[in-house]
Amino acid sequence: MRKYTLLLGVVACLLMSRVGRAQGFPSYSPPPMNISQMNMNHMYYGNNRNPNYRKGEGSYQLPDGSWHKSQKLVFDGQKLVVKDADADKLKLDFEAWRQLEVQRDTFLVMSNLPGRAQAADKPELVHSLLNQHGVRVLELCADYGKARYFVSRPQVPLQLLPSGKADFKTAMLAIVRDSPILAQEVSSGKLGRNDVVQIMQEYVDFLKRPGAARN
């Protein structure tokens, strides 16, 4: 009996000593990972693409005013690449051209957009959503807040449409006031800021009618 008691005591001592040694080991914590800065566009859209990505036949305008057609243009929202088989591959930052027409879309590079306290450091890219009979609706690209819309009309400078619901209604009513039906839809809230292209399209249709009043 004493042998068994002694043996159990030895085993207990060995177990306690192992536990003690294990508790004495420093715990391992992996070093923090150094994650480099990533382009947010890549995270959101993948494959280096963003909502302004276009590919296909089109034409582009250089700062000197000249237009150049291409069978294969690739625009990733930041760079324009001309990939025609019979010409050298050309890469242009969007500040190196003035207008781009591809896949029935038109992008413009503009400076001094209205609504700013001071001019931007570099020209900005805008998407033409509507361009008919001298009336144009533009949307600022790569602006990760609320969409910013601009409207131009014949003999009227480009204007920034307000983002607030009430201010937008006031500004839009000043434009479409000559069309009673359209003014009523805007005034009642049936058509709002998210319908800016539809509003201006209907306004253009109104202006094309014989005898329509104009602002």
Image (cartoon, helix red, strand yellow):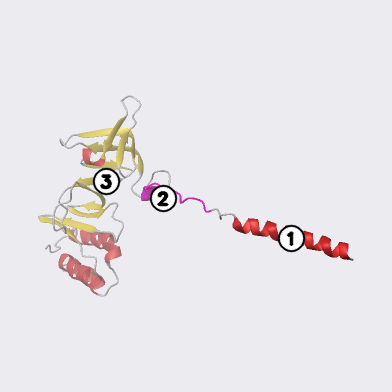
Residue with the mark numbered 3: 106
User: Is 97 displayed left or right of 35 in the figure?
Assistant: left
Residue 35 belongs to the span the image colors magenta? yes
Using the image, determine if residue 186 lies above or below residue 43. Answer: below
x, y (%) of residue 101? Answer: 27, 42
Q: Please tell me how crowded label 3 is: few (under 14), some (14-19), or many (20+) other residues with Cα within 10 Å.
A: some
Q: Nearer the viewer, mark 2 or mark 1?
A: 1
Query: Which type of secondary structure does the marked residue at label 2 adopt?
Result: helix
Q: Which mark is residue 43?
A: 2
Query: Which type of secondary structure does the marked residue at label 3 adopt?
Result: strand
In the rendered structure, which disc, 3 or 2, sits on the residue that comes first in sequence? 2
Which amino acid type corresponds to the residue marked 1 in the rendered image? Cys
Residue at mark 3 to residue at mark 2: CA–CA distance: 26 Å
Residue with the mark numbered 1: 13
Residue reaching furthest to the top: 86
User: Is 91 displayed left or right of 109 in the figure?
Assistant: right
In the rendered structure, which disc, 2 or 1, sits on the residue that comes first in sequence? 1
Residue 39 belongs to the span the image colors magenta? yes
| Secondary structure mainly formed by the magenta segment | loop
Asked if residue 184 can be seen in this view, the reply is yes
Residue 54 picture quarter: top left
Residue 146 picture quarter: bottom left
Q: Please tell me how crowded label 2 is: few (under 14), some (14-19), or many (20+) other residues with Cα within 10 Å.
A: few
Q: Nearer the viewer, mark 3 or mark 2?
A: 2
Identify the residue at image location x=25%, y=61%.
Answer: 202
Q: Are marks 1 and 3 in contact (CB under 8 Å)?
A: no
x, y (%) of residue 111? Answer: 16, 48
